[in-house]
Image (cartoon, rainbow, N blue to C red):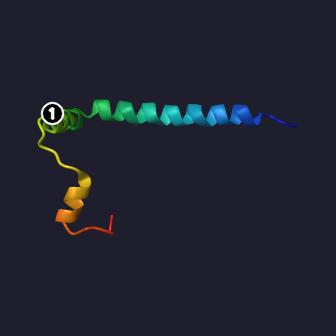
Amino acid sequence: MVLLTEEEKELLTKAASLMDELLETLEVIQDKKLVKDLKIALREVEEGKARPLDELIRELSLEGEI
């Protein structure tokens, strides 16, 4: 007896994954400090105050460790 087809299993897996993403988003939205920090970080990126991660890794001599 087959309860679910492979296609149905795949759809169920995708739906569960989407639900996890939505729950995580709700957690983030409820954290006022985190939302504020994210807005500040995005503004700093737009203002050119950020730099590429690989540049930071080189500066900290972390090549091959990350």
**Measuring 32% from the left and 69% from the top, which residue is drawn there?**
65
Residue identifier under label 1: 43
- Secondary structure under tag 1 reads helix
Residue at 21% x, 64% y: name it.
Answer: 58
Displayed quadrant of residue 41? top left
Residue shown at 61% from the left, 37% from the top: 13
Residue 59 percent location from the top left of the image: 17, 64
Q: How many marks?
A: 1
Left or right of residue 54: residue 16: right
Query: Foreground residue, 22 or 63?
Result: 63
> Which quadrant would residue 56 be assigned to in this image?
bottom left
Q: State the residue at coordinates (71%, 31%).
A: 8
- Which is more toward the observer, 3 or 14? 14
- Check the image and report above or below for 21 versus 56: above
Residue 30 found in image quarter:
top left
Q: Quadrant of the C terminus?
A: bottom left
Q: Position of residue 20 (x, y in %)?
A: 48, 36
> Callout 1 environment at 10 Å: few (<14), some (14 to 19), or many (20+)?
few
Q: Position of residue 3 (x, y in %)?
A: 80, 34
Amino acid carrying label 1: it is: Arg
Q: Quarter of the image containing the N terminus? A: top right
Spot occupied by residue 45 in the image (x, y as percentages of width and height): 17, 38
